[in-house]
Structures are given as C-alpha cells and as structure tokens.
Amino acid sequence: QVQLVESGGGLVQPGGSLRLSCTASGSIVTIYDMGWHRQAPGKQRELVATISSGGTGDYADSVKGRFTVSRDNDKNTVYLQMNSLKPEDTAVYYCNADVATPRTFGMTYWGKGTLVTVSS
C-alpha cells in the first residue's frame, strides 16, 4: 500500500504565503506524476498543479504566477509554494501521486487533505 501525507496548511492573511508538502511512503517502485487539487466549501474538487517525474509543472489559470509546484524524488515529496494568497484560495488541498508498486503498474493515490484558510 501507499500513503500520502500532507502538511503545511493553516491560516494566513491575504497576500501572504504558505508552503504545502506531501510525502509518499509504502511499497513504492516508481512515482510518476504528482500534483495538488483543492476543494472549497460547496464546490467541486479542482486541479491546482501537476508535476511530472522530470519536474515539468502545469498550473490552473487561477494560480499561474502565484503558485509553484516542485518535487524531491529522493524524498518522494511534492511541494506547493503559494504566494500572494487570496480569500478565494481557501480550500482543503489534496495531493495525489501516480505510483507503481510491486503489484500494480500505476495507480493514483490521494492524501487526506490539509486546510488552507486565507482571511484577515
């Protein structure tokens, strides 16, 4: 099995910054794409950013220029640096990873989420 654990959420004022981390552990052979989604109250979960195993990032239009996704393959960890935060960024942020294990070629695993609240 594979587990993903997020950290770094919290309360921040508008214009502030936060850095989220997510570490994968378990029976991991290879991690392919990793990413972040978010779900605001009363809304559907939406893609925030993805990053390939080679480090190529892609972003939702709403966060381009403010958020940066990165990863440390040696640590099986993906990061989301969030700058210039806005109240509309308030959501539970979930990380995901496409993982090959000894028993499966590739499955998508999800963390349990970390809450980010942007408010004055």
Image (cartoon, rainbow, N blue to C red):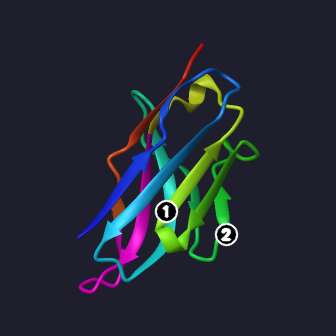
For mark 2, what is the residue? 56
Q: Which residues are magenta?
A: 93-108
Screen quadrant of the N terminus: bottom left
Q: Residue at x 46, y 68 (%)?
A: 76
Residue furthest toward the front?
Answer: 75
Toward the top, the furthest residue is 120
Residue found 56% across the figure and 75% down from its top: 53
Quarter where residue 13 is shown:
top right
Which amino acid type is shown beneath numbered disc 1? Thr
Which SS class for mark 1? strand
Q: Quadrant of the C terminus?
A: top right
Q: Is 25 included in the stretch rendered in magenta?
A: no
Magenta stretch prevailing secondary structure:
strand
Q: Nearer the viewer, residue 72 or 116?
A: 72
Question: How far across and how far down the image is residue 115, in percent?
Answer: 43, 34
> Residue drawn 67% across and 43% down?
63
Q: The residue under label 2 is which amino acid type?
A: Thr
The 10 Å Cα crowd at callout 1, few under 14, some 14 to 19, many 20 or more, is many
Report, in whole angstroms, how far the alpha carbon at label 1 lies from the one at label 2.
Answer: 15 Å
- Horizontal arrangement in the rendering, residue 45 relative to residue 12 (left or right): left
Q: Position of residue 47 (x, y in %)?
A: 52, 50
- Find residue 77 and name its label: 1
First in sequence: mark 1 or mark 2?
A: 2
Q: Closer to us: mark 1 or mark 2?
A: 1
Q: Quadrant of residue 65?
A: top right
Relative to 8, say whether 40 is above or below: above
